[in-house]
Image: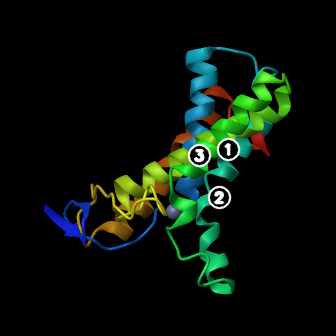
Amino acid sequence: MAFRSHGTNTLIIVKNNSIIMPFVVTHMLVPMILIDIFRDNILKIKKSKLSNKYILIAGLAGLLPDIDIPLSIFFPTLFAHRTITHTVWVPLTFLFLFSVFHFIRKRNWSMIFLMCFIGTAIHITLDVVTAGSIQLFYPISKTLFAVYLIPAGSVIFVYSAMDAVLLWIWFFRKMVFGKGIEDVI
Ligand SMILES: [Zn+2]
């Protein structure tokens, strides 16, 4: 475990400081599985109230922050990886839009923005917890945040295992409860 300072800013580093991200499958499946379980097992509401279309949107939003990877190729000065698209401002913007559309009773758009809030918030949380340092409040603050839960040297193995376990959960739910990715797509 290490603790470093970055200029005048605080940097929280645990165990190592490599920058690797969870795989695409993880970023997409985590919000989809969590919302699916929340809908069916906690809220216990019908699919007509929270349809699979919205769960798919949350999964796609889970990929959204990493759009800075292709964008950084074409606009390297504007979109360095893990800068503006990996800040709290992204999910907060979606939360604000959700509030606005909820207030004016546009349910479809409010649900879309709520799913975008959940997907992007989970992406950034996953990156902070498992995959290196992030400037959560960029460009206002360049303080870096990171919690390295995965031991250095086993990152690729753990990410592969995460993807495998998530896919297993997904297909297990399909086999046992009749729910799965086919319901969404
Ligand atoms: Zn990311």
Residue 70 location in percent, x, y?
A: 65, 77
Which marked residue is nearer to the observer: mark 2 or mark 3?
A: 3
Q: Is residue 179 above or below residue 61?
A: above
Q: Is residue 131 above or below residue 103?
A: below
- Residue type at mark 3 is Pro
Q: Could you tell me which residue is drawn at 21 percent across and 60 percent down?
A: 14
Neighbourhood count class around disc 3 (C-alpha, 10 Å): few under 14, some 14–19, many 20 upward: many
User: Is label 1 within 8 A of ligand 1 (CB to nearest ligand atom)?
Assistant: no
Residue type at mark 1: give it: Cys
* Callout 3–callout 1 Cβ contact below 8 Å: yes
Of residues 33 and 178, which is closer to you in this image? 33
x, y (%) of residue 44? 64, 14
| Residue that carries the numbered disc 1 in the rendered image | 116
**Which of pointers 3 and 1 indicates the residue nearer the eye?**
3
The alpha-carbon separation of the residues under discs 1 and 2 comes to: 9 Å
- Residue 161 lies left or right of residue 36; in this view the side is left
Mark 1 surroundings: few (<14), some (14-19) or many (≥20) residues within 10 A: many
The disc placed on residue 67 is: none
Q: Residue at x 36, y 61 (%)?
A: 158
Which residue appears at 69% of the width and 85% of the height? Answer: 74
Q: Earlier in the sequence, mark 3 or mark 1?
A: 3
The amino acid pointed to by label 2 is Leu
User: Is the C-beta separation of discs 1 and 2 under 8 Å?
Assistant: yes
- Image coordinates of residue 71 in percent, x first then y, are 66, 77
The residue indicated by pointer 3 is 91
Rounded to the nearest angstrom, the CA distance separating label 2 from label 3 is: 11 Å
Q: Is residue 112 above or below residue 105?
A: below
Vertically, is 110 above or below 129?
Answer: above
Is the residue indicated by label 3 positioned so its CB lies within 8 Å of ligand 1? no
